[in-house]
Image (tube, rainbow, N blue to C red):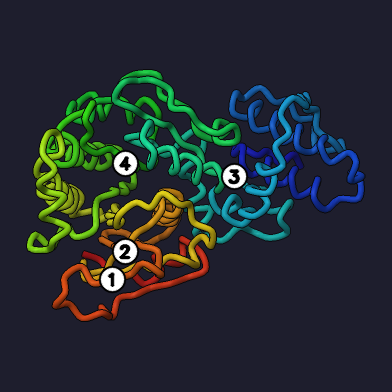
Amino acid sequence: MTHRFCNHAALLMLILLLVETSSFFAPSNINRGHAMMTMVSRDLHQRSIMMIPSSSSSASIRVDSSENDPSRRKFILDNANRILLSSSIVSSAMVGKTPPAAASSEVSALYSAERPVAILGGGGRTGKEVAAALAKGGLFGIAMTRTGKSPVLPGYTKDFVQPYSEPVNVCDADGLIKAMQAVHASAIVYCASASGKGGTAFEVDDIGVANAAAAAKALGARFVLVSALGVDRPDSKGYKMTNSLGGNYDKIMDAKRQGEEKTRSVLAKSKNYMIIRPGPLLGVKGKGGAADIELNQGDIIGGGISRDELAGVVVGALLSERKGATVEVYRTKTRQKIQPEFDPVSGNEVTADTYVELFGNVKSD
């Protein structure tokens, strides 16, 4: 019986596992596997791969050895289970058993090339890290920017995340929905925020967020909003300082709070959202992954977090079955009370080995 893989990442992962474990490939020929990975990803994405019927022991794949990045193979191998869970179709014969119900009925239909994750603010530093995190997990995305210019992404990321060629203005509600419909987005990650060259805080962090939430509702897509720590604490020093930055950033915390409130209101019925509140964004990348991160609720405890760690949390929120919640995330070593009078322990602290597991016990809004 012929088994067809409709998701690029599933076949890519299986080829890499073969390269890694099969004695057919001698160590000296391992680059053949790297090159094969590159072309499979590209050819599948362009739907131009030709498979020999299952009676044959091999597939006809055109190999381009010009790109051999060992880190890409490692990323996929390290996330093999996640890729299987996010694949559109995985042959039960190839994995030896029927995939879990959650993978086949929910996660499997999402985040594929046909139904990618739309990244709003895809040209910013956080948006680029989200794109990289999606690619590392074998998930597909579309990077959208206000200018329509293609963001500069690492080589491996381009195999999974494509730029959207048209400008996307989050203040244009109708245009935003049309853009999401055009790419058949299964999720929207909102990384956009006020900037010196872009819109004001109330345009981007308030109105734009509400428009994106409405677009998610119209498409039945999951919505992940990157907000800010301390939004519920207008009397805190951090809130007051950030809120008084002036220019396009003036009253940005007020705008973010209103954006959060509108998200909960627009998606009140489906609860298909997750609001993530990072603390100050650190310049040094994380080393320990999810194990270094603490998740909290109640806007009582916070701390710093790097953009790559934040991106990992975003992807964890996408893959988690939890929804309709607001969480604070920070590197555990940087944890501190948001206000001096607060108790140093909120009672809602969560740590885990993976970003998905961080969301295992979150409380709904």
Q: Is 41 on the left or on the right of 290, as rendered?
A: right
Query: At 29% from the left edge and 62% from the top edge, which residue is drawn?
Result: 328
User: Which is more N-terminal, label 4 or label 2?
Assistant: 4
Q: Nearer the viewer, mark 3 or mark 4?
A: 4
Check disc 1 and report the residue beneath it: 336
Q: Nearer the viewer, mark 2 or mark 3?
A: 2
Quadrant location, the N terminus:
top right
Q: Is residue 73 above or below residue 162?
A: below
User: Which is more N-terminal, label 2 or label 1?
Assistant: 2
Label 1 neighbourhood size at 10 Å, few (<14), some (14-19), many (20+)?
some
Q: Nearer the viewer, mark 4 or mark 1?
A: 1
* Mark 2 and mark 3: Cα distance apart in space: 40 Å
Toward which corner of the image does residue 336 lie, by quadrant?
bottom left
Check disc 2 and report the residue beneath it: 303
Quick one: 8 or 172, which is closer to the camera?
Answer: 172
Quick one: 82 or 109, which is closer to the camera?
Answer: 82
Residue type, numbered disc 4? Cys
State the image coordinates of residue 334 (x, y, percent, origin top left). 36, 67
Secondary-structure class at tag 1 = strand
Residue type, numbered disc 2? Gly
Quadrant location, the C terminus:
bottom left
Check disc 3 and report the residue beneath it: 89
User: Which is more N-terminal, label 4 or label 3?
Assistant: 3
Check disc 4 and report the residue beneath it: 191
Residue 265 at least partly seen = no
Query: At 40% from the left edge and 28% from the top edge, which residue is drawn?
Result: 183
Residue type, numbered disc 3? Ile
Q: Are marks 1 and 2 in contact (CB under 8 Å)?
A: yes
